[in-house]
Amino acid sequence: FASNRTYELKGKTLGIIGLGTIGKKVARRAAAFDMKIVYYDIVRLAEDAEDALGVHFVLLPELLRTAIEAQHRGWLGARRLHPKAHWLLQEVRARGLRIGIVSNTFDPPDLLHADLVSDGVTERVDAIVFSSELGLRKPAPEIYRAALDALDVEPANALFVGDRVREDVQGPAALGMRTCLVTYFRVDGGDHGLADAVAESPADVLATVDTIMAAGRGG
């Protein structure tokens, strides 16, 4: 038997773009559930018409922002930090190395930065570059250069760690960075042999760091 799911609509916000015939029908239905209804249209309704429908006019940027924030909140439960993430960052930092984050993202940067602060990541890294902030996505070389510049590190002295062959191996390698492909979150379908190292755990990432450092010392 199919399971039935129920959702509490009372007090929730509904955004409508274009309050035509269909939009008004949706608004009336939503009002019956005591929802907060905001709308945007090129032509605003008269105040008495808004009151009759129980809707509130907002500008389009505000409406879109409300929708993005709601979508972002919906993913919070699915976002998870690896149990060893803080440990790995702290161990790398303890070796006197700088750490940067480069991430392809869609959400506004302020929401993403807030997530990293909440997760205790921001305090453990030195640079953060989001594609939604820069306007370019991996594997565009500019996004890697932005992180390298922020860290004041040359490509030859950098190790790029990530779980996607195209974005986290081929892109960084084209600039001269060493690469470490991690497989403990997901296993990419690309050629793993293109990476300088493959890590099945955070401990493997740290081992790769130590190996590179030892080679640099001639040890």
Image: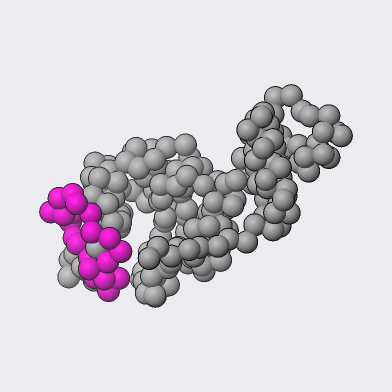
In the rendered picture of this protein, how many numbered marks are placed on residues?
0
Q: Horizontal placement of 159 versus 84: left or right?
A: left
Q: Position of residue 18 (x, y in %)?
A: 65, 30
Dividing the picture into quadrants, the one containing residue 61 is top right
Up/down of 199 relative to 109, above or below: below
Q: Residue at x 40, y 47 (%)?
A: 104
Q: Position of residue 52 (x, y in %)?
A: 82, 39
Q: Residue at x 22, y 65 (%)?
A: 199
- Identify the image quadrant of the N terminus: bottom left
Q: Position of residue 125 (x, y in %)?
A: 46, 62
Q: Horizontal placement of 34 versus 83: left or right?
A: right
**Residue projecting furthest to the top:** 43
Q: What span is colored magenta in the figure?
A: 184-204
Up/down of 42 relative to 33, above or below: above
Q: Horizontal placement of 195 versus 87: left or right?
A: left
**Residue projecting furthest to the left:** 193
- Identify the image quadrant of the C terminus: bottom left
Up/down of 54 relative to 202, above or below: above
Dividing the picture into quadrants, the one containing residue 141 is top left
Asked if one can make out residue 209 in the rendered structure from this viewpoint, the answer is no
Dividing the picture into quadrants, the one containing residue 9 is bottom right
Front residue of 189 and 52: 52
Front residue of 83 and 155: 83
Q: Is residue 194 magenta?
A: yes
Q: Is residue 61 magenta?
A: no
